[in-house]
Amino acid sequence: MNTNPKETSYYEMSQIESLSGEIDKEEERERKLLQILLKKDAEKKNLLRDNKRLEKECKKIRSTKIWQTSKHLNKISWLVSFLRDSINPVKKGINDELHQENNYLKGQVEVLKQEANRKKLLEISDVDDEGYNRESIFMLLKEAKDDGNFIELLDSIIDDKQLNQKKYIESLKYAAKLFKNERVELKNLVYSRVLSALPTEEIPEFIFRTQDNDVFFPFKEVGSFKTSMALQTRRIQFIQDSPQSILDDKRIAYSWVDFLGLRRPSVQDKTFTYLTIPRDTGVVIKPVKGSGSRGVYLVFEKDYIQDVRRGRILHGWEALTVSMLNDIETSWVENDEWMIEELILEQTQTFTPAKDLKFYCFYGKVALILEIQRFPTLNYCWWKPDGTRISTGKYENDLFKGSGFSEYDKEIAASLSSEIPAPFMRIDFLKTNNELVFGEFTPKPGNYDEFNSEIDTLLGNYYLDAESRLSADLINGKQFIQYQYLQKNRYNEKISFR
């Protein structure tokens, strides 16, 4: 564990970021091409219908006596027209201009059609439940499919906040149903849109019925981290000794990482009140029960103490005592019970605390990394596993350009995660200039519901994948020997704190 890993260079990170951007552009280009294909398909079908109608009319005309006697006159008329156009370039230029204007007008007609569809949708949205005619939206969707403007209307329905839940769900289901018998590419385009917006429990059976590989990828929209966390919380209520519950106890977690040989802060094996806290320096004072950095203080010197939650410096022990009492009186801290642990610095002989690296781990796989800088201001940086910065919808107003992590850091988190018989565990570390120090296990990250839909889906699918792999390993007899040791000895063996 003391190996000095080679850090990912800035050049390598920029190369990875550039490559990821190209992949995103390619996916967006493919999506736009599929939308064009959908429009062309609609145009082709309309042309085929028109051709059949015209063929029937032509057949009727050719069968008449007038047509039989005028065939030769038609040929002569065409020849005269051709000669007239050939010797009249001015008229030909006028015809070209008219042709261009006609194309422009066609484009304007399409815009007006889309606007008309939106207005119809709004009119339908304004009707109350009693006067709601479900066929109105269905007809609107069918017409949009025939006109080639289906995706635009579908996006309008998804974005429209005026549709009530019943109309919204029925509209999305019908939209998917219209493409049941279409070719794979178009089916995937529509299904992926519908699945991104439809609640998982409302997905119709006919979508899941599609099992061949060509149309499997839209199901990636089904995953939801919010749903997985809610279900995990409910499962833990049934099993009190779940891995998540056991490892959520910081002292038990420290005992286990000691057994595994990981570096972690030393902790004083005693609980204090705010009046009995020893006046030590180079320590972290934190409540025994707390969350969100409330009541956490970094004591660099006796006259230089950082209030982590409020982002301020306290000059003296009296100011710290007053602040801790305020934490208790305002219920920021549940009880007057405090613990002391070693203060980990980014570099020795500095007043800069180590940054946090929080790895979102899914049974041996890292899906997301959060880097936190706590001073001079509280800032955040989100990372993909490949080292690319990413937006998640959380902390959007407090982002900074972090320094990242090494491949070695990620491997440590992934390896530790693979020893825990649970689909998900966030594993938190402190990052100094030369080592990774274990912080804590977090089975349920705070405010996980604030992730945007893209990240919620991404993490939801990581969870489902982890759950499937874990089930397969348990069925195949994986023992989780290191975790079993922890489970058997967590009460019988005294925990040592260094």
Image (cartoon, helix red, strand yellow):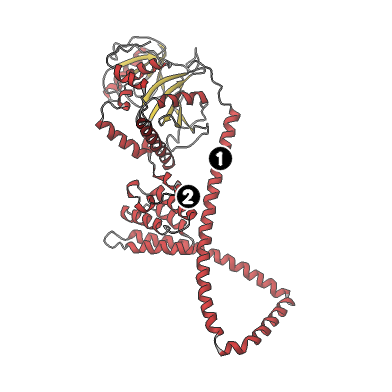
x, y percent for residue 68: 60, 88
Q: Residue at x 54, y 86 (%)?
A: 63
- Report whether residue 122 is seen: yes
Report helix, strand or loop for mark 1. Answer: helix
Residue tagged 1: 21
Q: Residue at x 55, y 63 (%)?
A: 107
Point out the frontmost of discs 2 and 1.
Answer: 2
Disc 2 crowd, CA 10 A, few/some/many (<14, 14-19, 20+): few
Residue tagged 2: 214
Above or below, 361 against 354 in this view is below
Sequence-wise, the earlier of marks 2 and 1 is 1
Quarter of the image where one finds residue 288: top left
Quarter of the image where one finds residue 250: top left
x, y percent for residue 297: 38, 18
Q: Residue at x 41, y 59 (%)?
A: 178
Q: In the image, is 5 to the left or to the right of 328? A: right
CA gap between label 2 and label 1 equals 25 Å
x, y percent for residue 166: 31, 54
For the C terminus, the image quarter is top left
